[in-house]
Image (cartoon, rainbow, N blue to C red):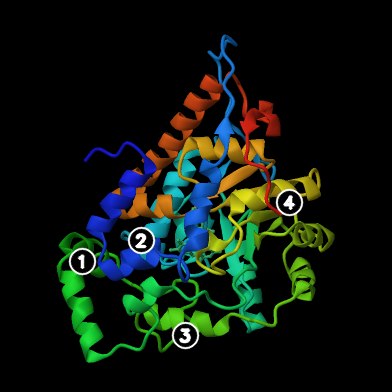
Amino acid sequence: MHPACLYDYRALAQKRLPSFLFGYLDGGSFGELTMRDNEAAWARHRLRQFVLRDVSKLEVSGSLLGRAASLPLALAPVGLAGLMRRRGEVQAARAAEAFGVPFCMSTVGLCSIEEVRAATREPFWFQLYLLRDRGIVKELLARARAAQCSALVFTVDLARLGIRYSDIRGGVNAPPTLKSQLTRVLDVLKHPRWLADVAIGGQPLVFGNLTQYVPAARNPEHFKAWVDSQFDPSASWKDIEWLRTQWDGPILLKGILEPDDARMAASVGAQGIVVSNHGGRQLDGAQASADALPRIAEAVAGKLTVLVDGGVRYGNDLIKARALGADGVMLGRPWAWALAARGEQGVREVLGMVDNELRNSLGLMGHTSLNDLTRDSLLSPVARD
Ligand SMILES: Cc1cc2nc3c(=O)[nH]c(=O)nc-3n(C[C@H](O)[C@H](O)[C@H](O)COP(=O)(O)O)c2cc1C
C-alpha cells in the first residue's frame, strides 16, 4: 500500500509490530471513550469556505516558543519509541529536524538525551515527569541543559498511571509467567522484520536516560515497572514552583484541561501549556482536548503559549486548533505509527502530509495564512460546559 493519509501508517504499523507493542501504542484507558472522543471532537467542527480570494501564496510557517518552525506542530513525547524502530528516538528527531519542527523526547525513551543530541544539530525539547526521587529529576534536568534542550515539557496528568486494558492483555507491566513468555516469543517470531530491526539490531533495549538508576533492569519492562513506581501522586503546584527554580528555559505544562489550571500555570511561571488528556490514556471520560481548548485559550490568551494534542489526524485539525485559539498542536500516535512503518522517512512523510493537507484546506477556505483564522472561520457545535 502506498500511504495516502496518517491512518494508513497505522495499518502498516499494525502489520509490522508484535501485537503487544501495537496494543501499547494504540490503546487508551478503560473503555477508550476519551481517546475516541479526541478524534470525534475535531470532526464536529466544520470549516467555512470563501471563494475567489487569490490563494496562490500560502503561509503556514511560524514560531513555537520563540523559535522558527515550518509548521506550528511538534512531535509529542512518546515513551518506548525506540521499540517501534531501531533507535527510534534518533530517527524521529532527525525527521523533525529535517522538516523544521521540534521533537519532544520522552523521559522513557530507549535512546538517551545524549544519543539524540549527538545525532542532531537543532535543539530538541525534553519531557519529564515528576519522579519521587527529586535528586534524579535534578540530574535529568542537568543533562537536558547540557544537551541544550530548548524547552522542558513537564507532564502533569500522570499522578497515577492510567489503566489500559490493551497493556494488561498484552502482558505489558505484568510479571512474566511461562505462558506469557511463550506467547510473547510466538508474537515476536510472527514479526521477523521487527525482530531483525529492533530486537536484534536495535540493542541495547534499555531506557537510555535511566540506566544508572535501575542497574538491575534487563529489559524495557523492568524499567517501565520502576518508572511506574516513581510517579509521585503527592505532586502539587508547589512542585512546579520548585521546578521553576531548577530550569531557566521555557516550561510547558502538559495535561491541562481546565481554565483554572491554565491560569495557575501562568501564575507559577510556566511559558506554556499543552491542552491534553494524554491521548486518552489516563482519565477515561475526561473531556476531549478540542472541546477543552476554546475556554482555556480564552483564559490565558497572550499570557501563555497554548499547544493542544489528542486526535490530531488531518491537516484540517491543525486549522481547527488554530481557529480555536491554540498556537500549535502536538502529534502523538501518528508519528509513532509512521516510525514503526517506515522509520525516519515515514515520520518525514507524515509531516509532509499534514503540511500538504493544511495548505490545501487553508486555500480552499479562502485564507492565505494561519494567522487569518479565528473562531469565525469555523461552524462549531454549541459548547457543552
Ligand atoms: C505510546 C504512547 C506513549 C506516550 N508516552 C508519553 C510520555 O512518555 N510522556 C508524555 O508526556 N506523554 C506521552 N504520551 C502522550 C503523548 O505525548 C500525547 O499526549 C498523545 O499521544 C496525543 O494524542 P494522540 O496520540 O491522539 O495524537 C504517550 C502517548 C502514546 C500513544
Relative vertical location of residue 11 with respect to residue 136 in this rendering, above or below: above
At x 53%, y 76%, the residue is 161
Local crowd size for mark 4, using a 10 Å CA cut-off: few (<14), some (14–19), many (≥20): many
Ligand 1 within 8 angstroms of badge 1 C-beta: no
Q: What kind of element bears circle 3?
A: loop
The x and y percentages for residue 314 are 46, 39
The x and y percentages for residue 324 are 67, 40
Q: What kind of residue is marked 2?
A: Arg
Q: What kind of residue is marked 4?
A: Ile
Q: What kind of residue is marked 3?
A: Val
Q: Earlier in the sequence, mark 4 or mark 2?
A: 2
Q: Is residue 276 visible?
A: yes
- The residue where tag 1 is placed is 195
Which of pointers 3 and 1 indicates the residue nearer the eye?
1
At x 75%, y 54%, the residue is 271
- The residue where tag 3 is placed is 214
Quadrant where the C terminus sits is bottom right
Q: What kind of residue is marked 1?
A: Leu
- The residue where tag 4 is placed is 296
Quadrant where the N terminus sits is top left
Q: Earlier in the sequence, mark 4 or mark 3?
A: 3
Q: Earlier in the sequence, mark 2 or mark 1?
A: 2
Q: What kind of element bears circle 4?
A: helix
In the image: residue 179, left or right of residue 230: left
Q: What kind of element bears circle 1?
A: helix
- The residue where tag 2 is placed is 87
Ligand 1 within 8 angstroms of badge 4 C-beta: no
In the image: residue 321, left or right of residue 112: right
